[in-house]
Image (cartoon, grey):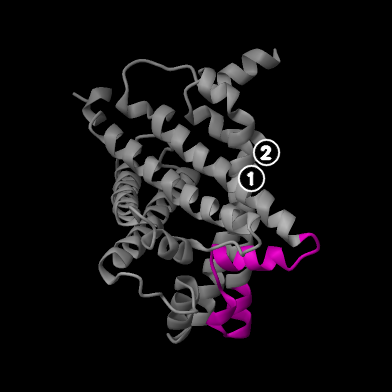
Amino acid sequence: MSDKSDFGWAIPIMRAGYAGRALVYLVVAGFSLWAVSRGGEAEGTSSAFASLERSTGGTFVLLAIFLGMLSYAVWRVIDAIFDLEDYGTDGEGTIARGGMVVTGLIHLAIGFGALTLVFAGGGGSGDQSAIAKGADTIMGWPGGRWIVGIAGLATIGAAIYYVKKAWTREYAKHLIGNPVTRNFDPALRGGVASQGFVVGVIGVFIVYAAMTASGDQAGGMGQAFSWLRDQPYGRILVGMLCVGLLGFALFCAVNAAYRIVPKARHGSLDSLASKIEEKAS
C-alpha cells in the first residue's frame, strides 16, 4: 500500500534545500548590492563567498550554505526518482525530472565551493571562474567544443523556462495559496524573471566560449554583472538586478516554507494559482 505520508520524511530535506538556496542568493545579491551602493562592483558567487569567509561568523554561514546545497541536491534526486511532484513519465515529465538531477548537481558544486573556502581559508580561487575552468577542461576533450556549446544552449533553454515561468506564473501551482504567497507574489515573479535573465546571459557566454574555443569567455554570475555594468546606465541596471535576485532569494525561502509536494502530503491544498484565478474571476 502506498500512502502520501510515506514520503513525509522528504519534506524537511526539501525545506533545508530551498532555505540553503535562498541563503546563497541572499549572500551574492546582498554583497553585490552593498558594493554597488558604495561605488564598488557586484560580485559573483565565488567572490561573494570569499568576502563572506572574511566576515565575522562567515564560516558558519558557509557551512550552512554547504549543508543547504547538499540538502537541495538530495531533494532533487529524491524528487526525480519518486516523482514526488507528479511531473509524470511522458517525454516532458522525463526531461523535467532529468533537469532536477542536473540542477541538484550544480547546486552541490556550489556547496562544495563554500566548503572549500571553510577549509582553505581566504585563499582565492584565481581570476578564472569555476565555469570558465570547467569549459577549458571540457574543450580539451574530443568533441569538447560541441559539449560546451550544447551545455550553453541548454542553459539558454533553462533561462527561457524561468522567464516563461515568471510570465505565466507557473510557479504558483507549486505554492500554497495564503496571505504570505499572495502578498509577495509580485516580488516572487520579479525574482524568477531576474534569475532567468542571469541564467540567459551565462548561457550566451558559454555558447560564445564554445564558438571561440576559449574557456575564458565563459563565466558565471560575476561575468553577467560585469557585462551589464558595461551597458549604458550599467550601475543602475546592476543595482536593479541585485534587487531582483533578492526577490529570487525570497522566492526560494517561500518555497522552503510553502511548497506543495503532492505525494508527501495528505489531502489537497489550495495553491496560489487557484487563489489568483479566484481573484481574477
Q: Which residues are magenta?
A: 207-233
Residue 264 pos. (x, y %): 30, 27
Q: Residue at x 40, y 16 (%)?
A: 268
Residue 8 pos. (x, y %): 25, 28
Asked whether 46 or 186 is in front, the reply is 46
Mark 1, residue position: 193
Q: Quadrant of the N terminus?
A: top left
Residue 104 included in the magenta stretch of the image: no
Q: Quadrant of residue 53?
A: bottom left
Q: CA distance from mark 1 to mark 2?
A: 8 Å
Against 147, residue 75 (above or below) is above
* Mark 1 or mark 2, whichever is nearer to me: 1
Secondary structure category for the residue under label 1: helix
Locate residue 55 relative to residue 152 in the image: left or right.
Answer: left
Q: Residue at x 70, y 16 (%)?
A: 280
Mark 1: amino acid: Ala
Residue 211 included in the magenta stretch of the image: yes
Mark 2: amino acid: Trp
Mark 2, residue position: 167
Q: Is residue 281 visible?
A: yes
Mark 1 crowd level (few <14, some 14–19, many ≥20, 10 Å Cα): many
Locate residue 214 relative to residue 123 in the image: left or right.
Answer: right
Q: Quadrant of the C terminus?
A: top right
Whether label 1 touches label 2, CB < 8 Å: yes
